Image: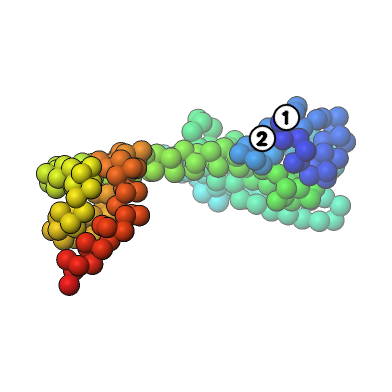
């Protein structure tokens, strides 16, 4: 694994105890090491983790919602965790098995002292699903912003073409006079760079920002 050096030594030692390596026992998930469920089962067996019978907290197969409470014991210590599976965080067809795996994996990590150092396999699945949701929401927001920008551009296209012409001709007084015809909020939304999908080029924007003649013209016309 490319990020083997970032794996805590405590994790490596646990893996050595079951004759596993970081490459065979898990994978890197966005910079955090993740252990397979089957690896954690071997870790539990090697350490001597014992589980009580699980307690089912939610049992709603119609809505595919399951929550299971799991208690585990090791060397006089007890830890517990709740595993949940529902349509929003579980894509497979076995919600009971997924809920149990999630709860047991977290209990194992707590009892053997690895919780906070690594993810379990199903915690990583949760992370990826949340990440996918975030990306989808970001794409929707970007599309909405683009639609709003294009509508704004259509309403002000003559202003934009005239402004670009004034910038090209270094006609700063004409540009300053035109600048007064539009409010600051609309200006901020219109004056984005072409690399972001905007009308004005980076050069045009920079000429406006650093040009003393333009700033002087704006100040004089503002009096």
Q: Quadrant of the C terminus?
A: bottom left
Q: Give neighbour class at mark 2: few <14, some 14-19, many 20+ (Cα, 10 Å).
A: many
- Of residues 204 and 90, which is closer to you in this image? 204
Q: Is residue 203 left or right of residue 26?
A: left
Q: Is residue 162 left or right of residue 58?
A: left
Query: In the rendered image, is residue 101 in sight?
Result: no
Mark 1 lies on residue: 1
Identify the disc placed on residue 191: none
Provide residue 155's location: percent of width, then percent of height: 12, 46
Mark 1 falls on what kind of element?
loop
Mark 2 lies on residue: 28
Provide residue 29's location: percent of width, then percent of height: 62, 37
Determine which quarter of the picture holds residue 158.
top left
Residue at image position (19%, 50%) is: 171
Query: Mark 2–mark 1 contact, CB under 8 Å?
Result: yes
Distance between the alpha carbons at the discs numbered 2 and 1: 7 Å
Q: Is residue 109 left or right of residue 162?
A: right
């Amino acid at each position: 694994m490319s990020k083997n050096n970032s794996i805590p030594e405590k994790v490596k030692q646990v893996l050595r105890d079951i004759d596993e390596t970081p490459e065979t026992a898990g994978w890197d998930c966005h910079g955090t090491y993740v252990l397979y469920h089957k690896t954690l089962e071997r870790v539990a067996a090697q350490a001597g983790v014992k589980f009580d019978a699980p307690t089912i907290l939610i049992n709603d197969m119609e809505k595919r919602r399951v929550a299971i409470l799991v208690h585990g014991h090791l060397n006089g210590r007890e830890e517990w965790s709740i595993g949940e599976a529902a349509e929003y965080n579980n894509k497979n067809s076995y919600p009971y098995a997924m809920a149990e795996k999630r709860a047991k994996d977290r209990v194992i990590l707590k009892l053997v002292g690895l919780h906070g150092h690594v993810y379990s396999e199903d915690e990583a699945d949760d992370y990826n699903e949340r990440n996918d949701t975030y990306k989808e929401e970001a794409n929707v927001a970007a599309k909405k912003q683009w639609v709003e920008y294009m509508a704004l551009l259509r309403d002000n296209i003559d202003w934009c073409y005239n402004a670009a012409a004034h910038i090209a001709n270094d006609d700063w007084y004409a540009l300053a006079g035109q600048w007064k015809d539009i409010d600051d909020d609309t200006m901020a939304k219109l004056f984005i760079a072409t690399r972001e999908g905007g009308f004005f080029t980076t050069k045009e924007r920079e000429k406006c920002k650093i040009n003393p003649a333009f700033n002087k013209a704006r100040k004089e016309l503002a009096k």
